[in-house]
Amino acid sequence: MTPCRCKNETWWNNKVLSIVNCSDSDLQEVPDFSYLQSLKITKLLLNKNNISVLSDRSFNRVSVEEIDLSRNSIKTFENQTLSHLSGHLKKLVLKWDEIPLDRGLYFLHGLKELEELSLDSNFIENDKQYLPGNLFANLGLASLKKLSLQSCDIKNISADAFIGLETLEELDLRYNDLEEIPKAIFSLLNLKVLVLYGNNIIRLRNNTFIKLNKLEKLDLSANGISTIESGAFVGLEYSLKELLLHYTDLSTVPTSALQRLEHLTSLVLSRNRIHFVPESAFKGLVNLEMLELDNNPLVYYKEMFSGLENTLETLTIRGTGLTSLPKKSLMSLKKLSYLDVSFNNIGDLHDNALDGLNIKTIVLTNSNITKISPRAFTGLKNPVGLDLDHNSISNISFILEAEPCIFKYIDLTGNPVLCDCDTEKILNSGVIHYSLTGSCTLYTGSAYKLGSSLLISELNMLCNETTRMFWCHEAVQSHAVPKSELSSLTIFFIFINFVISV
């Protein structure tokens, strides 16, 4: 043991947390922590060092809840390396440590309080990239809830590999070489989160998840999945809430498999090859609140979201080839409050562009917008937040001409907005509920942040300063409330409060 303190040691200690940071300190071995033996350490950071051996004495004089040993070159773990921490250690991070996982994980034995273990970016030594059976059996990891095995070059997993991890709730196997869903997951009856992002899975077969009736989140994104059999999600009918199929190879919505998932609230189908969404595509998804269809070459028609009329609240359809807002497809979605149509070629917003929609936030980033009609927002049922980042909008007078207080906020970041007297009126009149963000350029060529005191000062000198006319936070049902129209009762209470405070 190194009988000295860490070269770059930093501390943070209070009644709740004690953190010792020995990261990136050129350590060859674990320092002597005897001077800390009276202190219960919350977090010990030993990452980014050159520690190659962990001996039985490495942690025998320290009480710690979390250890990060990432990015060392650990060649040797002695049998009792971590045994002294068995009653305290809750989280252990061993990323990028050159650990051959298939040789055994005996050094974890007895960590009965361990809840989270990360073995990311270590490796399999055998040629078949095979994670062997009974790897965790008899280790006594009775409290382990989360296991991460990202980027370990795993191609095959023994059916007995996870025996001994019956308490596990989260398993992360992203960025491996798996070609099938491993049958080893069948022993994880308490699993709630399964991440298989970035593997080589091309087909989901019937009954693949049949025993995982507590699974709530399933991430199968970035696989080459082109076929999902109708019974693939059998067993998940009453548990699965979030399903991610981003960046797979689907050419259609897998309706027959999805219709069983009546508790699903979030579905991600972005970046696939889906062209046509059948009228019955979302049949059975009676609780779906969020749907993401980004980067699919979609054809829009009136009934494409049938079945989601009374549940869908968030819809993202970025980069789907739109040249205008698909109002006919959206009108039936009575609960839709957040709509993202960014990275489409929407172009200018004309009269009644949003008429009849229930949205409270619309995102139009990178939508090739130059002009906006003040009547584009006629008929909106709620004040709206408007994200217009990175378009080509220079004139923002539409804000003044639209119904007062119809905008909760407007984000104009990345637009060539001109600072003029209309800008001054918008900033001083109070016509927007909360904020106008972005920047604008004055006639002098100077750029200012919208709403900054410097800009307002410049505009007040250039224009006739506008008196505040609206208090949108007091608006009711999206109607503006000029101060002059406050009820006499309200004014009476304001007067009484003033007298009392004095």
Image: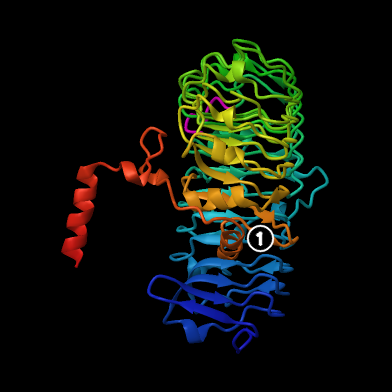
Q: Residue furthest right?
A: 127
SS category of the residue bearing label 1: strand
**Near-viewer residue (170 or 114):** 170
Q: Residue furthest front?
A: 464
Give percent across and percent down for residue 164.
Answer: 53, 46
In the image, taking residue 409 as reference, residue 177 lies left or right, namely right
* Quadrant the N terminus occupies: bottom right
Q: Which secondary structure is most common in the magenta stretch?
A: loop
Vertical placement of 195 versus 120: above or below?
A: above
* Quadrant the C terminus occupies: bottom left
Vertical placement of 492 versus 37: above or below?
A: above
Q: Amino acid at mark 1?
A: Tyr
Give percent across and percent down for residue 346.
Answer: 72, 29
- Residue 442 appearing in the image: yes
Give percent across and percent down for residue 8.
Answer: 64, 82
The residue identified by callout 1 is 448
Vertical placement of 190 versus 249: above or below?
A: below
Vertical placement of 300 versus 448: above or below?
A: above
Query: Would you identify the image quadrant in which residue 456 lies?
Result: bottom right
Q: Which residues are magenta?
A: 209-215
Residue shown at the point (54%, 59%) measured from the top left? 109
